[in-house]
Image (cartoon, rainbow, N blue to C red):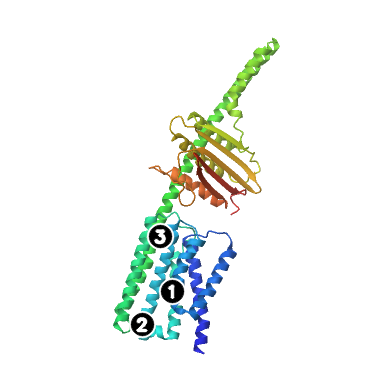
């Protein structure tokens, strides 16, 4: 009967373990797939497998836990490979610390030796259940304020956190080994030392989180600074266009008067010549209707002027985007950063090289597709699918790429970068919906 009861009691242990994995990885890294059914199915299977191992092969449960700690983040969650592997290692270390804490606590309270705890089936279950509950509580504590991916965290912070937590795991292993070798139940000194080690492993995470908050604030400040710079440039272009329009409006009466007099005198050739000169002067303003979105057209026109002044051929093919519901502000962030990077890449080419940029925009189904192709030196694609910046001061360049990615993710879109035979291609696809529908 005791064996059957123990079998049933393994189910809440497996359920706690599944909850720990789901909470820790989703809050610490962020899910890779949008399908909730996928994650429900995966964790349901894990729950059943863990329960079966606990009943049939309890000695293999630790190996299953370690394997799951590394497989799940790599296969199911976002972040660089370093972030995902380190995250799996963190959870493994935390699991070991909680197991050691529970074992020494049980040994101290019930006066069992370590070998006696393992030999007693009921005490083994009590230890497993207590470890699962403590680890779940620890997971909730260290992730309670975390709801987004930590992929922006510098690797050095991740590695420092992992190193300290693994040192705590090593100290826990040493404490358990001392108790096992003594052949006696754990004493108060061993219990207090293990409690201090467990507390340190939790507190170090909050130190790490303070660095993470600092890194996020720094990134946010850089993004805001870049957006302000873009807005300043946009308003300068609008102001320049306004001055041109006002100048034309001011002179249009004189122009019409001159044309009327030429026509009255039957000087048709002179009138035609005068009209051609007038159209040539006003074409820079009139040709700026590209997408039908005034703020977007002003931005693109300004970038075209910058590119052409640098000897860069700029080709554009765009549908009218009157039905596009995406915020023009977000669209300008994508286009401004992407075109700036394309112009910079062209400028880095050696003398005599063909410098060109091709911008295409169109709507397909319920998506807006943007493709920018530019001539470029060989470009390395970094982790996450974005080109690695080689600038010493990457405040605007590096964060500009991150800004594009943030907007794309905001609209549940996709971004793809590729380099082939002297051409760099940036392809963006975002859902055509207003920003508030999130």
Residue extending farthest to the front is: 421
Residue 211 percent location from the top left of the image: 38, 56
Badge 1 or badge 2: first in the primary sequence: 1
Query: What's the mark number on residue 114?
Result: 2
Q: Which of the two marks, 2 or 3, is nearer to us in this view?
A: 2
Foreground of the two, 257 or 385: 385
Badge 2 or badge 3: first in the primary sequence: 2
For the residues marked 1 and 3, what is the alpha-carbon distance in whole angstroms? 28 Å
Give me the residue at 60% from left, 20% from top.
251
For label 3, the residue is: 209
Q: Secondary structure at mark 2?
A: helix
Query: What's the mark number on residue 62?
Result: 1
Give me the residue at 43% from left, 82% from top.
124
Q: Secondary structure at mark 3?
A: helix
Asked if 16 appears above or below 242 in the picture, the reply is: below
Q: Is residue 136 visible?
A: no
């Amino acid at each position: 009967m005791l064996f059957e009861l123990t079998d049933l009691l393994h189910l809440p242990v497996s359920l706690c373990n599944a909850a720990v994995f789901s909470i820790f990885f989703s809050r610490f890294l962020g899910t890779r797939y949008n399908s909730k059914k996928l994650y429900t199915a995966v964790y349901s299977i894990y729950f059943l497998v863990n329960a079966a191992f606990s009943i049939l092969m309890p000695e293999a449960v630790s190996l299953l836990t370690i394997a799951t700690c590394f497989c799940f983040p790599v296969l199911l969650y976002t972040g660089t490979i370093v972030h995902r592997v380190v995250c799996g290692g963190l959870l493994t270390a935390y699991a070991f610390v909680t197991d050691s804490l529970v074992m020494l606590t049980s040994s101290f309270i019930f006066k069992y030796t370590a070998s006696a705890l393992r030999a007693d089936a009921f005490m083994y279950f009590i230890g497993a259940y207590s470890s699962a509950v403590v680890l779940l509580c620890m997971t909730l504590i260290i992730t309670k304020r975390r709801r987004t991916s930590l992929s922006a965290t510098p690797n050095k912070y991740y590695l420092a956190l992992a190193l300290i937590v693994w040192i705590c795991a090593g100290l826990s292993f040493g404490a358990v080994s001392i108790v096992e070798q003594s052949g006696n139940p754990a004493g108060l000194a061993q219990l207090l030392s293990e409690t201090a080690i467990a507390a340190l492993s939790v507190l170090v995470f909050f130190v790490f989180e303070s660095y993470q908050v600092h890194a996020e604030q720094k990134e946010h400040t850089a993004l805001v600074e870049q957006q302000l710079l873009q807005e300043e440039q946009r308003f300068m272009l609008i102001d320049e266009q306004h001055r041109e329009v006002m100048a034309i409006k001011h002179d249009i009466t004189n122009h019409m008067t001159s044309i009327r007099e030429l026509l009255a005198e039957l000087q048709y050739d002179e009138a035609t010549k005068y009209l051609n000169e007038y159209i040539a002067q006003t074409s820079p303003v009139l040709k700026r209707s590209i997408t039908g979105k005034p703020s977007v057209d002003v931005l693109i026109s300004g970038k075209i002027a910058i590119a052409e002044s640098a000897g860069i051929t700029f080709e554009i093919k765009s549908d009218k985007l009157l039905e596009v519901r995406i915020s023009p502000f977000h669209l300008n962030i994508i286009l401004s950063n992407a075109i700036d990077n394309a112009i910079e890449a062209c400028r880095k080419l050696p003398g005599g090289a063909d410098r060109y940029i091709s911008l295409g925009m169109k709507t397909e189904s319920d998506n807006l597709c943007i493709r920018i192709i530019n001539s470029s030196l060989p470009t390395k694609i970094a982790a996450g699918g974005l080109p690695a910046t080689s600038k010493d001061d990457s405040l605007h360049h590096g964060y500009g790429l991150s800004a594009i990615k943030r907007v794309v993710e905001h609209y549940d879109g996709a971004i793809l970068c590729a380099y082939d035979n002297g051409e760099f291609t940036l392809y963006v696809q975002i859902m055509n919906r207003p920003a508030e529908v999130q």
